Image: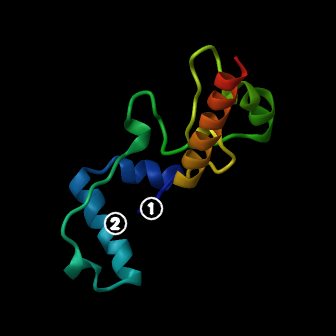
Amino acid sequence: NGYIFGDHGRQFAAMSLQKRLEEGLRYASEIHPQVTEEFDNGYSVAWDKVPWILGGYSQWTPELREKYYRDLCEIDGRIALAGEHASYMNGWLEGAVTSSLDAIGRIHAKAIAK
């Protein structure tokens, strides 16, 4: 599992799936030479090419977080958002999990307050 971003990431994303897997194995074999013998199958997602996604994870600037983060995390009627984008651990599954637990807590608090 890994991320490549910036110019190198765009070059990597322009490759075919097969070529991305081959290149990933080549890079991994520099650290773990046995990886090519142990590899069964793999998959690679060029996140910046996926419509409505345009990247592997969110990247907040301090200014954007200050301006929008509080509203993003507020419950709006029956809608509560959760995910790494709604946490301070952007790009990590832990951020998505803690964000979902926070959203569940806010939904529960709203429900019992009625």
Nearest the viewer among 94 and 37 is 94
Q: Which residue is mark 1?
A: 2
Please name the residue shown 65% across and 43% down the image. 87
Which numbered disc covers residue 96? none
Residue 108 sits in quarter:
top right
Frontmost residue, 86 versus 113: 113
* Quarter in which the N terminus is drawn: bottom left
Task: Evaluate if marks 1 and 2 touch, with contact meaning CB atoms under 8 Å apart.
Answer: yes
Q: Position of residue 114 (x, y in %)?
A: 69, 16
Residue 24 is labelled as: 2
Q: Earlier in the sequence, mark 1 or mark 2?
A: 1
Question: 77 left or right of 55?
Answer: right
Q: Amino acid at mark 1?
A: Gly
Q: Residue furthest bottom?
A: 33
Q: Position of residue 49 (x, y in %)?
A: 38, 37
**Residue 22 image-quadrant placement:** bottom left
Q: Nearer the viewer, mark 1 or mark 2?
A: 1
Q: Is residue 28 above or below residue 91?
A: below
* Mark 2 residue type: Gly
